């Protein structure tokens, strides 16, 4: 999966824009949790270039909106098409909300 490779090999930051209950149900290790409705107010927490950002949600719709907005703010952001559904289907690791801080 290209997103996992960007994170592992190129130091991209995974930004999860799902709601807190979704995050608690399972999220990628090392992801930064910024719910979609909080992205504008928390944009300072999201890395700027040269660090790339991979934005993820459940299926790819909300993350596509967030990635487009972040690109407009000068971030190097890409959408993880297929979201965490594809992430999990690829056998990539997921943690529960208790495993890692937001």
Image (spheres, rainbow, N blue to C red):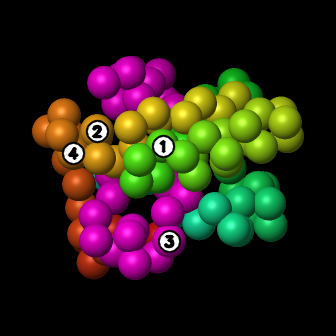
The residue at which mark 4 appears reads as 88
Q: CA distance from mark 3 to mark 1?
A: 14 Å
The residue at which mark 2 appears reads as 86
Crowding near pointer 3: few (<14 within 10 Å), some, many (20+)?
some
* Labels 4, 1: front one: 1
The residue at which mark 3 appears reads as 19
The residue at which mark 1 appears reads as 60
Q: In the rendered structure, which segment of residues is drawn in magenta?
A: 1-28
Decide: is 38 above or below 17. Answer: below
Q: Residue at x 55, y 58 (%)?
A: 17
Q: Is residue 13 visible?
A: no
Q: Are marks 2 and 4 in contact (CB under 8 Å)?
A: yes
Q: CA distance from mark 2 to mark 4?
A: 5 Å
Q: CA distance from mark 4 to mark 3?
A: 18 Å
Q: Is residue 48 left or right of residue 97?
A: right
The stretch drawn in magenta includes residue 97: no
Name the outermost residue toward the left. Answer: 91
Q: Is residue 89 visible?
A: yes
Q: Are marks 3 and 2 in contact (CB under 8 Å)?
A: no
| Secondary element at tag 2 | helix
On the image, the x and y values in percent for residue 50 come to 69, 25
Q: Earlier in the sequence, mark 4 or mark 3?
A: 3
Q: Quadrant of residue 67?
A: top right
Q: Where's the N terminus, which quadrant? A: top left
Q: CA distance from mark 1 to mark 2?
A: 9 Å
Q: Residue at x 46, y 76 (%)?
A: 20
On the image, the x and y values in percent for residue 13 come to 52, 40
């Amino acid at each position: 999966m290209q997103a996992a490779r960007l994170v592992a090999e190129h130091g991209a930051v995974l930004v999860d824009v799902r709601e807190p209950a979704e995050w608690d149900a399972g999220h990628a290790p090392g992801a930064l949790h910024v719910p979609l409705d909080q992205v504008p107010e928390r944009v300072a927490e999201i890395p700027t270039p040269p660090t790339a950002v991979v934005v993820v949600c459940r299926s790819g719709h909300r993350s596509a909106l967030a990635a487009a907005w972040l690109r407009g703010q000068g971030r190097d952001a890409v959408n993880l098409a297929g979201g965490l559904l594809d992430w999990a289907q690829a056998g990539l690791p997921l943690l529960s909300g208790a495993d890692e801080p937001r």
